[in-house]
Image (tube, rainbow, N blue to C red):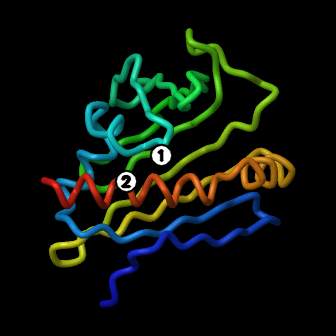
Amino acid sequence: MMLTKETIYSKDASNKKLSVERDFDAPLEVVWKAWTQSELLDQWWAPKPWKANTKSMDFREGGTWLYYMEGPDGIRQYCKVDYKSIVPNKSFAGFDGFCDENGVTNTEMPGMDWKCVFTSVGNTTKVEVEVTFASETDLEKIVEMGFKEGFAAAHANLDELLAAQ
């Protein structure tokens, strides 16, 4: 099986979905931890030169991850993930949205339903992410904001983190 060392996107506008696929050169348990533990997420989630900083994380069904991405100019963009379902080392799903520092949702910005599926492929791990939006307009707005470039840059950060372990 060929390893996909680039982030592959496919857009299904009519169903308001964005699919993302990426292979990582590490065992599933290691990749799972990188996606589900705040001390690891903070090291790769934000595209450089931005940094991710967790305010609080409760990785369980019904739990929340409240974090912000901080730019080199000190600007902070807060986000919150409400976890809906978790199958350890297999998948998790949740609602991701922009918010303020207290976790109050910013309804003027698009929210996204995420489903992340992890599959072991030998000593590598395939991560498939399906992001669903309330409308095609919301999907386009997130893409225009640089979602694809930012997520690909974050995946490159994760490659570096995994290589250092």
x, y percentage for residue 56?
38, 18
Instruction: Tell me, for residue 48, which label it has, or none.
Output: 1
Could you say which is closer to the camera, residue 1 or residue 47? 47
x, y percentage for residue 44?
37, 45
Q: Residue furthest front?
A: 73
Q: Residue at left 17%, top 64%? A: 27
Give the Cα separation between the discs numbered 1 and 2.
8 Å
The reply, left or right, for residue 127 in relation to residue 71 is: left
Dots 1, 2 in contact, CB < 8 A: yes
x, y percentage for residue 152?
51, 60
Q: Residue furthest top?
A: 102
Q: Residue at left 57%, top 12%? A: 101
In the structure shown, which secondary structural element does the residue marked by tag 2 occupy? helix
Which corner quadrant of the image does residue 121 belong to?
bottom left
Q: Which residue is mark 2?
A: 157
In the structure shown, which secondary structural element does the residue marked by tag 1 occupy? loop
Which corner quadrant of the image does residue 59 belong to?
top left
- Tell me the amino acid under the disc marked 1: Lys
Binning the other alpha carbons within 10 Å of mark 2 as few (below 14), some (14 to 19) or many (20 upward) gives: some
x, y percentage for residue 33?
23, 45
Could you say which is closer to the camera, residue 91 or residue 49? 49
Q: Is residue 138 above or below residue 11?
A: above
- Tell me the amino acid under the disc marked 2: Asn
Could you say which is closer to the camera, residue 55 or residue 86? 55
